[in-house]
Amino acid sequence: MSPKKRRKPDRGRTSTRGGAHAVTPLAVALREAPRLTGTDRLIVKLVASSWLGLAWSTRDTVATDAEGDLVREIARAQRSRPDRARAALAALAAIAVPPWGDEARAALPAAASADSGGPPRPVSTRRWSDAWDSERLYVLAYAEPVPHSVVVKAVVLDGLVVEELVVEVPGESTPPPEDAARDDIDAVLAEVADALRQTDELWPARDDGEYTEARAFVRWLVQGAPRLVEPRPSLSAAERAWMVDELVARRCPWSRLDEPTVRQFARIFIGYGERLLFAGPLAWSPTAAVHFLLDWFPVEVSVDPEVGSEVPALLSVWVQIALERRGLTQEHIDEVVEAVVSVEDEFTESLPDPEWDAFREEITRRVEAEGSTLRNGAAVHRAVLAHYAEAAAPPAPEG
């Protein structure tokens, strides 16, 4: 989906973190604020949001209040550039969210006007998810200050994370999927608010414009939404036992894994699902399967390569069992199995190689015996030559 965004005044050169020609959020706000006179209120709010997004995306790693810092800088700028600073503060006050919003309002002179009312309520909301609930799309339709929609695209793995925030107006909007259902407004507001919170907690932080430009505007819209309480589904003891037994029964008859090992892997699959699949231990998707094999398993599980090479085939059986129990069609189950097969070679290559590990340990030992480190290329070269020279030398005569 690539809907057109609500057009904002041209910014010119944008800021890049640490770039030689970086433009500060303060400079951008003071330059753009006067252009907002006579502009419709939606544009004003989106431009103010983009300033806050710029502050968020270019903040130092230790900064915890980037928005507040920008507000305070603009407030101080009233001494030298009063008209521009007050116009910027008025725009920020229009999407005020505590605590920085309180500072923006307080910094405005009493006579200054500001569109600082509370956020409007959506006239309707729609929610869509794919077959595995690994991607979600929320569409919030508003009538004020002009008709517009907010589209929130999120991914679901070990949490609910926003990928893209888009504000659309009639004539520029992209229709939602046909099966996107109208949903309870408060429930959608709560999910979007929770997705923003979880995305903000990511590290490294999301600092791309697809998220940051409209972030403050959407946060203003969902402020006051009820806190989302969405406990992760879990398996009962009986369900766990059944699924473990089912994996044992369905495993490939030519598999080299014995029954205790298969049961151990079943518990690993369940543990991964309960801890890391936001939608529950049965919510295996193509993305989750690839993440398990390429990102999680090599770091969290240590196995012999011969055992590890059996994992993709065993996982294919497991997702078949899990997704059947979840009620998915065979077509959607097959897509997850295909994702497993597609990365099988890459997964196998990531498994530890005992011979290579032993070789590396020997070279490290030889280099350290010289009083050097692996950063010394010459020392490593000598150690490798010595290793192969010893390996090629005829064995010493016995006796």
Image (spheres, helix red, strand yellow):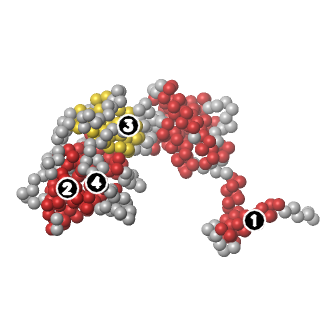
Q: Residue at x 68, y 37 (%)?
A: 256
Q: Looking at the picture, which amino acid does disc 1 mark?
A: Leu
Left or right, 356 with reference to 330: right
Q: Looking at the picture, which amino acid does disc 3 mark?
A: Met
Considering the numbered disc 4 on the image, is that residue within a helix, a strand or a loop?
A: loop
Q: Specify which label sits upstream in the sequence, 1 or 2.
A: 2
Which quadrant holds residue 13? bottom left
Q: Which residue is mark 4?
A: 11
Q: Which residue is mark 1?
A: 385
Which residue appears farthest toward the left when viewing the image?
Answer: 111
Q: Are marks 3 and 2 in contact (CB under 8 Å)?
A: no
Q: Which residue is mark 3?
A: 1
Q: Specify which label sits upstream in the sequence, 4 or 3.
A: 3
Q: Residue at x 58, y 36 (%)?
A: 341
342 vs 382: above or below: above
- Cα–Cα gap, marks 4 and 2: 11 Å
Considering the numbered disc 2 on the image, is that residue within a helix, a strand or a loop?
A: helix
Q: Residue at x 68, y 60 (%)?
A: 360
Q: Looking at the picture, which amino acid does disc 2 mark?
A: Ala
Considering the numbered disc 1 on the image, is that residue within a helix, a strand or a loop?
A: helix
In front: mark 3 or mark 2? 2
Task: Looking at the picture, tell me which residue is in the foreground, 225 or 106.
Answer: 106
- Cα–Cα gap, marks 4 and 3: 25 Å
> Quadrant where the C terminus lies?
bottom right
- Cα–Cα gap, marks 1 and 2: 68 Å
Q: Which residue is mark 2?
A: 33
Residue 242 in view here: no
